[in-house]
Image (cartoon, helix red, strand yellow):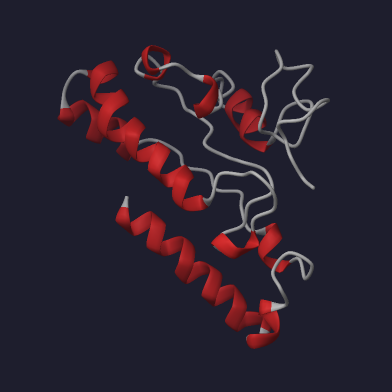
Amino acid sequence: MAQGIRWPYGIDLNNVRGRHTNGKNVADFFATYLGLPMPPPFLNLSDSERSQIKTGINYGSGACGILNTTRVGECLSLAQQVKYFTITRMKDLPKALKTQKKVREHLAKSIYFFSIGINDYHPEVNNNITSNFSSTGFADHLLDEITKYIKVH
């Protein structure tokens, strides 16, 4: 069972858990390239720490797909990840930036990176749901699903 909370994941990154790597992930490399600190995992931050961060938070969780049915083990569904982003947007960023205008400006110039969906294509995880679609039809279905979450929040 895939679980990024188990050893050895994270031992070289101050025991950060929830990632399926012992080193940097793609979001970390993007941040480093842009001269930003690596985005800390949402679940590793206290409320006060979250309300001070303006350079990015990682909401990701290994072993989850776009569809709720394509998750493996304990992972944060896309819905839960978006819920945590909403907490940052509605509660934490206003504390850090002080006004709604500054929050809107900050979010408008922010970069959003999604890396999700490999489990949706894995036949042992997706219960062969892909057989109900053409290859492009299934891709369109996944895009429709992820778009629902983006539009809501």
What is the x, y in percent for residue 123?
A: 77, 71
Residue 89 percent coordinates (x, y)? 31, 34
Q: Residue at x 42, y 13 (%)?
A: 49
Q: At 69% from the left edge and 53% from the top edge, which residue is drawn?
A: 72
80 lies left or right of 76: left
Q: Residue at x 81, y 26 (%)?
A: 7
Residue at position x 62%, y 57% from top? Answer: 65
Q: Across the whole image, how many numbered discs are drawn on residues?
A: 0
Q: Is residue 127 above or below residue 17?
A: below
Q: Is residue 67 above or below residue 76?
A: below
> Residue 86, relative to residue 77: is it above or below?
above
Residue situated in front as seen by the camera: 150 or 109: 150
Residue 106 picture location, percent across and down: 30, 30
Compare residues 36 and 19 and report the one nearer the observer.
19
**53 sits to left or right of 106:** right
Q: Quadrant of residue 6?
A: top right
Relative height, residue 11 to residue 150 (above, below)? above
Image quadrant where residue 28 sits: top right
- Of 37 and 40, nearer the camera is 40
- Answer left or right for 24 relative to 59: right
Q: Quadrant of residue 87?
A: top left
